[in-house]
Image: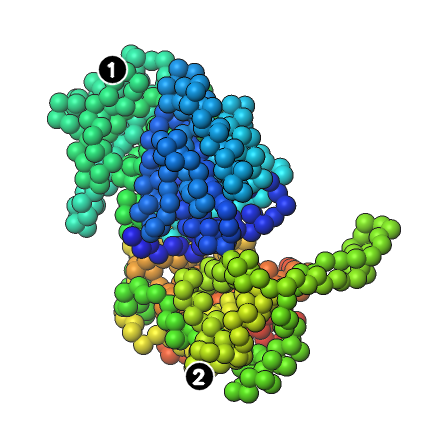
């Protein structure tokens, strides 16, 4: 099964590979529930096997069983031809090169667990010893590592004599000496895999008096379930949203009250609409994970089984206290997945909901999820802005992979522009050498030599650089070449075979191509790629994002239509912020200064809008979805992208469209991490000219503590005349 990996997943694979070559023994993968951790690790193992010999991965899972089989099944599904094993397979055939072995570690350690009797345990250890004697080396993956942090689990790990352990968790404990691979929730949300926001106690009054919290909270949850269900039906989406009700461990009386209240609302075990998952009571659980399953609610006590995946779960009622932060966040994870791994661009469907009267719990969730847990309110557009529209552009192409032929031309064009190469390949070699490209038949590593008296930066700068030459070995360095090629591909979302073909067409002697930079033999190509991996990566990434004549122009296959401001907005804000001032110039009534999620530049700009006499109103645009204003362009490799400018602003002399970016430090260094900013500026400027509007890019100059705007020519130097004080322009 082919699956298109999200950018953050490709980045995580590359980070894991970097972790394997670091000097740290432990690599920690922190990823929230719903980020596709198993898919990331499966592709990482596949990539690693291609680059290194004599390796075996052992993936340890916790729990009473099942998670190891789920993980193995996913790898079998996504990685064609992978060699996967369970514990029973290892006991039969031992460990072999390129094996990915999925083992429930509790089957190896727990007393009374008959998976391995004493003799079998000895036999298992013999399989490990035999593998080590055969020159194999083990890499351990510890899944849900917060549950595996025990002496017994460590004893098992030590048997494998590994020098690399990858620990995975949504809530890893402090590993001070580990190589961290941290997948941000913002990236997972942006790809549509998890819900945009968790809403805690939506529209609760500030002072609540309730006779019965069960009645109060479950009534809210049922009403929300019916509201969501109606919206799914209206959109002809066959999904039945699920309520999870979590009880305290000790109270059977509370279970009866919950069951009784659901029954009074027509939700019962008899009509299959109520399910229960307790240690001694299980009903209506069969196929409960299916999108259109009958149960509308499930009652649980302890944490649901590790790895349980029910993407239709959207509402959590929590009637429990004395819960650890880790456990809370894991439970919240169960309602965060998007049922179809995409956003519906609908505030109701793209949110998950928590109902609880437990203040400690909500605070714990806020701490654990950071900006992922926000207060929310429904805001309405002010009447005077209801007739406003702006022309928005939409992609009409169905998603397609990158255009390999265009990518080849763009990379060649970038080298032509940057290094002045032409069709004289012998001259091209000299030009690249002059720009620090390295040409040797050997593989060359560099190190430093010299004497240091004091541990200061200047002492290290004065060390001699030493180059260590190693004769190229096609078998050994062939693996390293594949590793380097895969690394470049991961950077620009191209698969291994495509990027390998591109490099061969650009640099290999025996392959005909009109875009030929060098004519290297196979051995020389290996050495060239390995010795210049960092420069090649930087240049190819820059080729994709840079401004070039004739490349990356606005796409022709676009739809244009006027869009109004949405009539209502699910407004998220930080209710704990000291500043809760209503911003009267925003187009929505009730828009607060504590609006989240906002970057520092966005917060500064909103304050500026509220104070400036020139500005009559401002609107914060969304960052995804057909109801928001977007401009379409292409990157240099032919991939259509939608650009959502941050703000639309009404002034006394017309409408402005502006994008905010990271600022400049006091010394003038850029803090903008978006490589596409020049391209976005270019496409924004063309749009503004086309529709006779004004606008630009806004960034903060930290030396003057002022916001500055660029409207005519984009420049990454704040000292240039292209940047003017915003107060002088708008």
Image mark for residue 170 = none
Residue at 47%, 23% (x, y): give it.
122
Mark 2 → mark 1, Cα distance in angstroms: 76 Å
Numbered disc 2: secondary structure: loop
Image mark for residue 256 = 1
Q: Which residue is nearer to you in this view: 507 or 488?
A: 507
Q: In which image quadrant can residue 648 be found?
A: bottom left
Residue 111 visible in the displayed image = yes
* Relative horizontal placement of residue 466, taking residue 345 as reference (left or right): right
Q: How is the image coloured?
A: rainbow
Whole-percent x, y for residue 434 in the image: 66, 78
Whole-percent x, y for residue 660 in the image: 50, 62
Give the total of numbered labels: 2
Mark 1, residues whose alpha carbon is within 10 Å: few (<14), some, or many (≥20)? few
* Relative horizontal placement of residue 261, taking residue 147 as reference (left or right): left
**Label 2 belongs to which residue?**
514
């Amino acid at each position: 099964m082919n699956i298109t990996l999200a950018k953050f997943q490709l980045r995580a694979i590359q980070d894991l590979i970097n972790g394997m070559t670091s000097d740290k023994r432990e690599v920690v993968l922190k990823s929230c529930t719903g980020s596709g951790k198993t898919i990331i690790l499966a592709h990482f193992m596949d990539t690693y096997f291609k680059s290194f010999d004599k390796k075996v991965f052992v993936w340890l899972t916790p729990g009473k069983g099942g998670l190891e089989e789920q993980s193995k099944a996913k790898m079998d599904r996504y990685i064609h031809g992978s060699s996967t094993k369970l514990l029973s397979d290892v006991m039969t055939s031992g460990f072999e090169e390129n094996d990915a072995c999925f083992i429930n570690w509790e089957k190896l350690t727990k007393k009374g667990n008959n998976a391995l009797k004493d003799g079998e345990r000895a036999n298992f250890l013999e399989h490990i010893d035999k593998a080590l004697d055969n020159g194999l080396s083990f890499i351990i993956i510890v899944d849900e590592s917060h549950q595996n942090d025990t002496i017994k689990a460590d004893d098992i790990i030590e048997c494998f004599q590994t020098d690399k352990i990858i620990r995975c968790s949504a809530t890893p404990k402090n590993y001070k000496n580990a190589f961290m691979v941290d997948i941000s929730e913002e990236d997972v949300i942006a790809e549509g895999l998890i819900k945009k926001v968790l809403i805690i106690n939506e529209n609760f009054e500030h002072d609540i008096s309730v006779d019965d919290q069960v009645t109060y909270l479950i009534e809210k949850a049922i009403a929300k379930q019916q509201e969501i269900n109606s919206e799914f039906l209206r959109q002809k989406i066959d999904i039945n949203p699920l309520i999870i009700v979590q009880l305290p461990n000790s109270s059977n009386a509370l279970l009866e009250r919950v069951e009784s209240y659901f029954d009074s609302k027509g939700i019962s075990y008899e009509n299959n609409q109520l399910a229960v998952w307790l240690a001694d009571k299980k009903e209506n659980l069969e196929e409960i994970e299916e999108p259109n399953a009958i149960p509308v609610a499930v009652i649980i006590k302890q944490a649901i089984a590790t790895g349980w995946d029910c993407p239709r779960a959207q509402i959590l009622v929590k009637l429990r206290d004395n819960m650890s932060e880790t456990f809370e966040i894991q439970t919240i994870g169960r309602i965060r997945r998007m049922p179809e791994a995409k956003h519906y661009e609908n505030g109701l469907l793209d949110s998950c909901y928590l109902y609880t009267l437990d203040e400690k719990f909500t605070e714990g969730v806020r701490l654990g999820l950071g900006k992922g847990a926000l207060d929310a309110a429904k805001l309405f557009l002010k009447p005077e802005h209801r007739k406003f529209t702006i022309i928005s552009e939409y992609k009409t192409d169905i998603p397609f992979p990158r255009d390999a032929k265009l990518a080849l031309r763009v990379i060649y064009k970038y080298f032509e522009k940057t290094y002045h190469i032409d069709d004289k390949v012998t001259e091209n070699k000299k030009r690249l050498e002059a720009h620090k490209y390295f040409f040797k038949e050997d593989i060359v590593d560099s190190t430093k030599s010299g004497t240091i008296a004091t541990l200061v930066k200047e002492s290290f700068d004065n060390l001699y650089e030493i180059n260590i030459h190693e004769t190229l070995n096609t078998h050994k360095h062939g693996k390293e070449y594949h590793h380097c090629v895969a690394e470049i591909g991961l950077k620009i979302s191209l698969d291994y075979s495509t990027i390998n073909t591109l490099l061969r067409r650009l640099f290999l002697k025996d392959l005909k191509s009109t875009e030929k930079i060098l004519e290297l033999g196979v051995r020389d190509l290996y050495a060239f790629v390995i010795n210049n991996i960092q420069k090649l990566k930087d240049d190819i990434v820059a080729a994709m994002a840079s401004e070039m004549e004739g490349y990356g122009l606005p796409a022709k296959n676009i739809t244009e239509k006027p869009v109004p401001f949405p009539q209502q907005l699910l407004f998220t804000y930080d209710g704990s912020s000291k500043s809760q001032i209503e911003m009267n110039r925003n187009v929505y009534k009730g828009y607060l200064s504590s609006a989240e999620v906002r970057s520092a530049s966005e917060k500064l700009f909103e304050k500026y809008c509220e104070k400036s006499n020139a500005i009559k109103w401002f609107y914060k645009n969304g960052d995804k979805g057909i109801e928001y204003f977007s401009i379409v362009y292409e990157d240099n490799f032919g991939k259509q992208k939608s650009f959502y400018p941050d703000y639309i602003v009404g002034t006394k002399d017309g409408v402005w469209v502006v994008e905010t970016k990271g600022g400049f430090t006091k010394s003038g260094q850029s803090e903008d991490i978006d490589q596409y900013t020049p391209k976005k500026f270019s496409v924004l400027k063309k749009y503004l000219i086309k529709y006779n509007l004004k606008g630009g890019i806004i960034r903060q100059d930290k030396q003057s503590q002022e916001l500055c705007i660029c409207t005519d020519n984009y420049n990454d130097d704040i000292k240039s005349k292209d940047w003017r004080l915003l107060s002088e322009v708008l």
